[in-house]
Structure formats: C-alpha cells, structure tokens
Image: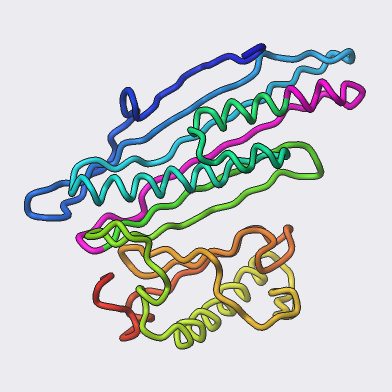
Amino acid sequence: MKNILLLFLCSTAFVACQSSKESQTTDAAVISVDSVTYNLKTAPKISAEGDTSITSISIKYPKLTGGDETVIAKINAQIEQLVKNEMFSMDDTVKTTKTASVETLAQGFIKEYETYTAENADLPSMGWDYYGFGDTLLISPKVISIYYNVTSFTGGAHGNSNTSYLNFNAKTGDLLKLTDIVSDTTALKKLAEMKFEVTQKQFAKDNDFEFNKSDYFWGNPFFLPANIAITKTGLTFLYNPYEAAAYALGPISFSLTWEEVGLIARKDIK
C-alpha cells in the first residue's frame, strides 16, 4: 500500500509475540497467555508549512493457548471479534466488514486516513493515531476475564478512549452474563450505587470540586455500567467517558470485594 510502512506484523498464523502468564485450569491442562500484535504507520508527511505528521495504528491483544482446545478456540474467537468491533471507521462500508482480518482492518484505517487527507488537502496536516491494548485480568478454573482498551485520535477537539471487559466460563468458553455472576442484580445495583457515591465523593474532594449526583447519569437514576469485570478479589465496574458523565470526568471505575458482594455472588464464578 502506498506510503505505508509495515514496521512489524505478528499474527497468530505465524508466531505468538509474547508468552506472559500461565494459570492451572485443570489437573492436566495449563492455559498460557500469548499476544497478537500489529503495528502499521505511514511515511512522514510534511505540509507546506513544514509540519510533519504520521498516522499509526498499534494493536495488541491476548491469545490463549493450552487448556481444552475447543474451549480456548471459542474464547479466542470472541476476543478477536471484540478487537474487530472496536476498529474505528468513518466509512459505513468499512464498518460492515468486521468479518475481515484484524490486519485488513488495520490497513483500512491507514487507507482511510490517506483518502481523507487527499480529499481535504486544504486542511491542516494532522496525523491519526489508534492504539489498542488488551490482556487477561483473571484465569481460574471457573472464569477467564480479559480487558481491551482503545485510545484513538482522528481529528477534533480531543481523542477518544474505550475499555471493554469480557468474562468467560472457563469450562465452556461461553460469555458470562450478569445473571451468571450474581443471583440478584437489583441487590448488586444497590451495593454498586453506594460504592459509586463513596468513591466519587472522595474523587471530588481530592480534585477540589463538589460532588453532585445530578451531574451523573444524564438525569436518569443510577445504572450499572456496560462493563463489569470479574477479578480475583471481586468485581470491577467501569463507566467509559460519556457513559455516565461528561468527558471531563474521564472513565469512572470502582470495585466491590467478594466480601462486599456477599451471598449474591454465584458459586460458579468464585
């Protein structure tokens, strides 16, 4: 592709880039965590004013090996699909091609930038950036959980960021629903709301502003975030920017220990 420099490409089809952790999931099978990495960037582009811009995309996400082959393949497929779903595109036709490989989508990001700059040559030269990184949060005999974070800049007042959590049944590879994690979601919501207020009041105090609950949830009652992670010590709740409050407040995160969750935690996930 014109003006694209392939710095490094590590695909699961060839070799895993890194083996970082292991966890015993059964008496016979150990699950290892490797990573899949893609790095692409354009050649430097120098504007008429002498400014240099480079567009780059860097992606790294976990790939599990070992364990039950069918289960691990199922989990890996869902992780890869998450990575694809998070790929940014201004072109609706590209958004519908999430069945393409991660490499193809990464190349599409670079191509889209080049098309955009060619069609808007009168605008100031400004590179785009896309950085996606993920890893495991927990590997246990019952649960495997991962996170994947994306930060990107494609022009505008500021960049964007988004973090996703996925929790899997370690024995089946199925994605866990909230009702698979706790027996009473209403009770969990009440516990989370109390912890949310405690942590945000402290955050406001630490940053010299007054906590006002009406500044959150866009005039709606408290709601649980889209992303809740199972960890070794409990549950982590994450609201991405704009999900529960203005961008200036950034992501909002807090945790409940298993002791705080109490008896509503299902035994299948602890």
Q: Which of the image's four quarters has the N terminus?
A: top right
Dividing the picture into quarters, in which one does residue 27 lie? bottom left
> Residue 51 magenta-drawn?
no
Quick check: 155 left or right of 138? right
Q: Classify residue 217 as left or right of residue 179.
A: right
Q: Position of residue 110 (x, y in %)?
A: 65, 25
Q: Tell me the magenta residue range.
A: 114-142
Q: Residue at x 51, y 86 (%)?
A: 190
Identify the residue shown where x is 36% and y is 83%: 183
User: Of 171 and 6, which appears nearest the observer?
Assistant: 171
Quadrant occupied by the C terminus: bottom left
Is 144 on the left or on the right of 147, as rendered? Answer: left
Left or right of residue 229, residue 189 in this image: right
Nearer the observer, 119 or 141: 119
Who is closer to the viewer here, 77 or 270?
77
Q: Quadrant of residue 60?
A: top left
When the figure is inspected, residue 157 is found, relative to residue 53, above or below; the finding is below
* Residue 24 in the image: above or below residue 262: above
Q: Residue at x 57, y 30 (%)?
A: 106
Image location of residue 43, percent across then percent down: 66, 13
Tell me what residue is drawn at x 33 percent, y 50 percent.
75
Residue 124 magenta: yes
Q: How many marks?
A: 0
Question: Looking at the image, which residue sits at the far left?
Answer: 27
Say if 209 sits above or below 151 in the image. below
Counting from the top left corner in percent of width and height, residue 44 is at: 70, 14
Colouring chosen for the image of the structure: rainbow
- Rendering coords of residue 198 (x, y %): 56, 79
